[in-house]
């Protein structure tokens, strides 16, 4: 089934190595030390490209590359469910023989053979945003998603007085960020909020429309629902849309990430609050780590890029506005 399709995609991608297709949304296309003098080339393959979050990561990577004297490409699938498309992008990135590779995995296991190929070619791999289920990456620059999700659970439980039925609309169950944001939330509730009843997690692929439909189904099946948590930008916006489309009030919605739609929803009171990552910081740390790897310098295996809870009470705090993206 799914794994067979992924295996087929990997096989097809290996063939694509001889083609070396160009990447979309890139800022450079040189290989190894690059086509700009001695500038090292870093290929970055993201989980997505359209969401404001990924554009903020791209901005941070570009800024740091300019400081470090490197060139980069930055690409990702149109949606965060296109595993096969991402595998092809990863294959094509390796064909360019970059000095280092940044990778945020949609499926933590599907890319293992290609990551092993990178290792055999002495191309250091830096994981970012979402951890990769592999020993190949020399470092991972990301939010501590389990702790961040636990923080969201804590705030929602406090809003509900530790009682009520709560649902999760997650963006996937294959990436490390998806599973950590689900598990961190559920584990905190189980350990600290015995009065909270957790419904089975539903998955909307980070798609707003699909997540909105799932939210409406959850509400219709559970008229006593007290709170809903969306695990990324698309999921959270979908939850907000679902609640609005049904005209429901009183449901506490908490989210993850901080695009304009979520910021607007929090300011209007439809969404109670969310966790914001530091996407520009993720991009910066990714390039810093890649440059250290290229130079053979030692570095930490895990680079925690931080997170904050934000709501209507602190959304204008300079510390918060510095990491929001619109």
Image: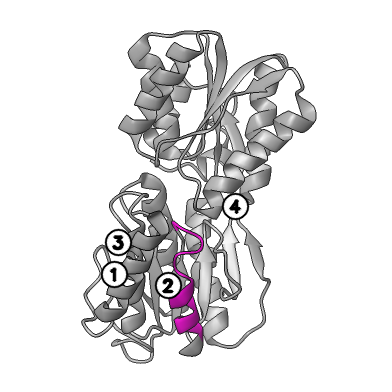
In whole angstroms, how far apart are the C-alphas of marks 1 and 4? 25 Å
Q: Which residue is mark 3?
A: 85
Q: Which residue is mark 1?
A: 27
Instruction: Specify whether 37 is left or right of 269.
Output: left
Q: Report the mark closest to the observer, 1 or 2.
A: 1
Circles 1, 2 touching at the beta carbon (< 8 Å) = yes
- Element assignment for label 1: loop
Q: Which residue is more in the foreground, 106 or 268? A: 106
Sequence-first disc among 1 and 4: 1
Q: Which residue is mark 2?
A: 65
In this rendering, would 185 be left or right of 3?
right
Name the residue located 59 percent from the left edge and 23 percent from the top edge: 313
Percent from the top left, x then y, of residue 211? 39, 31
Q: Residue 154 at what x, y percent from top left?
A: 70, 29
Marks 4/3 in contact by CB < 8 Å: the verdict is no
Question: Disc 4 marks which residue?
Answer: 143
State yes or no: discs 3 and 1 in contact (Cβ < 8 Å): no
The magenta region covers 106-119
Distance from disc 4 to disc 2, alpha carbons, whole Å, reads 21 Å
Is 33 on the left-hand or right-hand side of 158? left
Disc 1 packing (10 Å; few <14; some 14–19; many ≥20) = some
């Amino acid at each position: 089934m799914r794994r067979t399709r992924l295996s087929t995609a990997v096989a097809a991608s290996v063939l694509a190595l001889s083609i070396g297709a160009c990447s979309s949304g890139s800022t450079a296309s040189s290989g190894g030390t690059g086509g700009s003098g001695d500038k090292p080339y870093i290929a970055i393959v993201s989980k997505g490209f359209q969401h404001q979050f990924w554009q903020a990561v791209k901005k941070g990577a570009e800024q740091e590359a300019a400081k470090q004297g490197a060139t980069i490409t930055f690409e990702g699938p149109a949606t965060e469910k296109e595993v096969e498309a991402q595998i092809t992008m990863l294959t094509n990135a390796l064909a360019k023989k970059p000095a280092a590779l940044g990778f945020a995995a949609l499926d933590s296991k599907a890319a293992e053979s290609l990551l092993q190929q990178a290792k055999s070619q002495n191309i250091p791999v830096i994981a970012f945003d979402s951890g990769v289920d592999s020993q190949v990456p020399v470092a991972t620059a990301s939010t501590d998603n389990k702790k961040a999700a636990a923080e969201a659970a804590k705030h929602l439980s406090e809003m509900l007085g530790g009682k009520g039925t709560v649902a999760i609309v997650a963006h996937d169950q294959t990436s490390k960020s998806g599973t950590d944001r689900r598990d961190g939330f559920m584990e905190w509730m189980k350990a600290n909020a015995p009065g909270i009843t957790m419904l089975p997690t539903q998955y909307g692929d980070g798609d707003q429309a699909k997540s909105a439909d799932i939210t409406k189904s959850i509400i219709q099946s559970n008229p006593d629902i007290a709170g809903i948590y969306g695990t990324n930008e698309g999921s959270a916006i979908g939850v907000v849309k679902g609640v609005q489309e049904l005209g429901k009030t009183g449901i506490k919605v908490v989210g993850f990430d901080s695009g304009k739609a979520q910021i607007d929803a929090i300011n209007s009171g439809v969404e109670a609050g969310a966790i914001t990552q530091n996407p520009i910081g993720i991009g910066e740390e990714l390039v810093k780590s890649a440059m250290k790897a290229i130079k053979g310098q030692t570095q930490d295996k895990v680079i925690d890029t931080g997170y904050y809870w934000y709501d209507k009470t602190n959304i204008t705090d300079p510390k918060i506005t510095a990491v929001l993206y619109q």
